Image (cartoon, grey):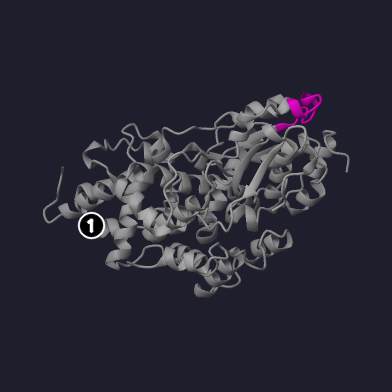
Amino acid sequence: MKKSSEKNENSQQSERLKFSFFPGCSLKASGHENTMSLLKFCDRVNIELVELEDWNCCGSSSAHSIDHDAAKNLPMRNISLVPKGIPLMIACPSCLIRIKSMYLKIKRDKALKQEYEELWGKPFDEDLEIVHFFEIINKIRLEDYIDQPKDKLKNLKVAPYYGCMLSMPPDLRFEKNYYGIMEQTLKRLGADPISFGYGSRCCGTYLSVAKPQVAQKVVNEIISKAMEAGAECMVTACSMCHLNLEIRCSLENPIPVLHFSELLSMALGAQDQKKWFPRHIVDPVPLLKKRGLISS
Amino acid sequence: MINQDGGSQTLVDEIKASSGIDFNSCLHCKTCANGCPFIEGMDYAPNAVIRLIQFGMEEEALKCSTIWVCVGCNTCSSCCPMAIDIPAVMDGLRHKAIEQGVKIAEPDIMNFHTEVLNTVKKYGRTHKLEIMMRYKFKKMDLFSDMGVGLKMLKKRKLDLTPSKIQDKKAIEKIFRKK
């Protein structure tokens, strides 16, 4: 992974925030535009991300559903790889849940802690901080990096879609919750966030493969509710939700679905949209041009 | 606790142990059933599955499609007035169904999970294209839903080669059966 750019070496090196970065399989292999725009965003707001070395799949729903041992060991190994003293930033809400809930389980279960230490040959890091990508927005002042932030997404009517995973399962009931952060941020950038009541509705995850009709129905419902509420595009927090909303939508003229990281990077003046947007099934370019937010 | 004649108290105890749920607390208000986005794909509503456990109706509970169609989105548990972790009940039943070797109500979903884990066993990470190909092959259904697959390839949403981890020994450790 690309290391921090050297231009900041003298000026802000000491303040530069550093995270271990866990991309997860969805971002690494299918949501490339999500990864690219996320890296761009972090670079622009002076955050250094170091990809977790040799990370593995978190196990996702599949290990959780049919293989308890793998569901335990897969996240455990990832936890054991994090260098001490550096918080772990996870971009995928589903990976976040798997890894964070396993971390908290080990923390409160002595036998499990012993098992972890024996299996991975390392002491368990009691102080490891595991955060979602959204936490970064809490840690910086976006306005410090943007001139006239209110013009950046001016008048864009966006329906923020969090998906179900960020709503936190019972295991993580007392952990930080990120609802509202997309609305707040969009407002600060001049956009008009649309609330539509389906922002945390599940996208259907793997039923998109095994029961496509069921997934199609929920996806169409989510997108049409956003459209009825007046949205002209949607923004997602999760790469897998994004994929499902794109591939399972069978509405006639659906609105484009963007990754939150794409809108953030755009607002920060990134010019790499040409690498991201051709990967979208519903092209967001005409809309963004019409609103005068991009030139080409 | 209601228990039908001949109903299984063991099932109640086992699922209680794996999920930490007191089955007496379900009021059958059906909030879970009304909120579930996937109820149409299920044979029993989520609260009905809890009812099956309350009655000790083990076979029905283990053979139902609901435990497979539930994706664990937690819509139900976040609106349950008794804060019951319903997906944890489904997990417990699913694992018990596998252990006991009962007929799986949703073989496609099981097949999908197996193929996902097969790529993780091979590469340490998932490989979507291979999962899809093997899933379709096993199902003997290569051509339905072809349009979506092609669209994904065209938009480069399916990498042709897998992303792999270096430490092969770690994968063995992860999947070693005790």
User: Split into 4 quadrants, where in the image is the N terminus of chain B?
Assistant: top left
Question: Which residue is at a point 42% across and 60% down the rendered structure image?
Answer: A70
Label 1 resides on the chain identified as B
Front position in the image: A214 or A73: A73
Q: Is residue A88 above or below residue B96?
A: above
Name the residue furthest front: A10
Q: Whole-percent x and y of residue A180? A: 58, 28
In which quarter of the view is residue A229 placed?
top right
Q: Whole-percent x and y of residue A43? A: 73, 41
Residues in magenta, as a range = A144-157
Front position in the image: A81 or A263: A81
Number of marks in the image?
1
Q: Is residue A231 visible?
A: no
Front position in the image: B19 or A242: B19
Question: Which residue is at a point 50% across and 39% down the rendered structure image?
Answer: A129
> Neighbour class for label 1 at 10 Å: few (<14), some, many (≥20)?
some
Q: Is residue A156 magenta?
A: yes
In which quarter of the view is residue B134 placed?
bottom right
- On the picture, is B73 further left or further right than A189? left
Q: Secondary structure at mark 1?
A: helix
Q: Which residue is mark 1?
A: B58
Q: Is residue A97 magenta?
A: no
Q: Is residue A167 above or below residue B160?
A: above
- On the picture, is A244 further left or further right than A109? right
User: Split into 4 quadrants, where in the image is the C terminus of chain B?
Assistant: bottom left
Name the residue furthest right: A295
Amino acid type, label 1 = Glu
Question: Which residue is at a point 60% across and 40% down the rendered structure image?
Answer: A133
Q: Is residue A162 visible?
A: yes
